[in-house]
Amino acid sequence: MGAYQSHETYNSINTDVKDGKRYWARFVDKPFAKGASRLAFQGTLYGDGPRNGSKCVTKVFKSEYAQHFVQMAPDLAASKKALGYAEEFGRNYFRRIRNYIHENEIEFLIPLIAKMQYVSTFNVLWFIPYDTDSRYVKSNEHVSIEPFIEGQYDKFNSNGGYEKSIHELMTTFCHWTWYISGHKFMVCDLQGVKSGRKYILTDPAIHSYDCRFGNTDLGVVGMEMVLGNHNCNKLCRELGLNNPMTGLNMRSGPRSTTYSFQVTEEDLLRANRGSSRHFRPMSAIFEVNNL
């Protein structure tokens, strides 16, 4: 008889954006969900703040992707910038489309980043350590921790051209971030849960003119992939959004996230130069403060 214990992290490196507290997580040894690049584990959050004892999800990169995400700062920065755009959209743009939609809020979850403290061991007779459980999690690995959200998880668009056009607000929001930023940023890879009148989103990607947001940032090449597959809807038209790539009939991109190490060297060079064939940077209408 025996069993694996739970995994545990150290206190988070960053503080919770809402209460300013640091937390750590204890989570189970088997994932309950698997994405293209990450595994998700259910657990419990602990700390001195109001979230102590609440359910959480700890996300770990699969082994074949982990080497590309040793430094998670760009991913955290992308989530914060995405939240900044969502807040501006809520302040000044929902009112312009309220007659066309039921939803009235977009929220991006900001993950806590923590380093692994204990990787669970298999205990013989429940108390004699026998073998470290390194099937999914490695010692000293960085993981992200988010609140557990009830509901049906869905992917609304990707960073490579896929979009679920039935979710018009999501595809319009992506288009709007590109337009409002003066073609310098695009929040995409939108995924999460639609809960009542609210979209709760996690793990966004941002394409930027200078490729600053890590391995999911494909720069202007990624922007072209998204715009070339975007079907503008009544919300786009109501907000006055232009799409210079309408009618080009680009091949639809994958539903899963596309990473910089999966595109051609030619595209990478063009992305790093910020050289689009279809648009140029302009003065931003709205800017999220540098993070």
Image (cartoon, rainbow, N blue to C red):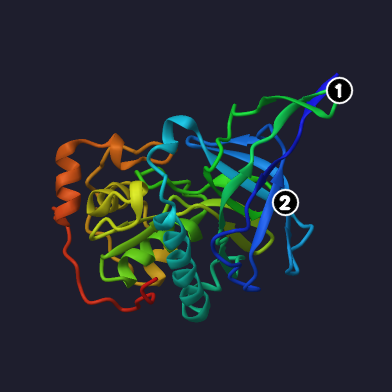
35 vs 231, left or right, is right
* Residue 29 at x, y percent in the picture: 69, 33
19 vs 258, left or right, is right
Disc 2 vs disc 1: which is toward the camera?
Answer: 1
Name of the residue lying farthest toward the top: 1
| Other-residue count near label 2 (Cα within 10 Å), few / some / many at <14 / 14–19 / ≥20 | few
* Amino acid type of the residue that numbered disc 2 sits on in the rendered structure: Glu
Quadrant where the C terminus is found in the figure: bottom left
Is any part of residue 101 visible from this angle? Answer: yes
Reading the chain from its start, which is encountered first: label 2 or label 1? 1
Residue at image point 34% right, 60% down: 186
| Other-residue count near label 1 (Cα within 10 Å), few / some / many at <14 / 14–19 / ≥20 | few
* Amino acid type of the residue that numbered disc 1 sits on in the rendered structure: Leu
SS for callout 2: loop
Instruction: Locate residue 207: give its quadrant.
Output: bottom left
* Residue 288 at x, y percent in the picture: 38, 75
* Residue 251 at x, y percent in the picture: 29, 37
* Residue 170 at x, y percent in the picture: 48, 57
What's the CA distance linking mark 2 and mark 1? 35 Å
SS for callout 1: loop
Quadrant where the N terminus is found in the figure: top right
Residue at image point 35% right, 38% down: 253
Instruction: Tell me the number on the disc at residue 125.
Output: 1
240 vs 114, left or right, is left
Is any part of residue 233 visible from this angle? Answer: no
Residue at image point 31% right, 79% down: 285
**Which residue is label 2 attached to?**
150
Instruction: Tell me the number on the disc at residue 92.
Output: none
Q: Is 227 located above or below residue 1 in the figure?
A: below
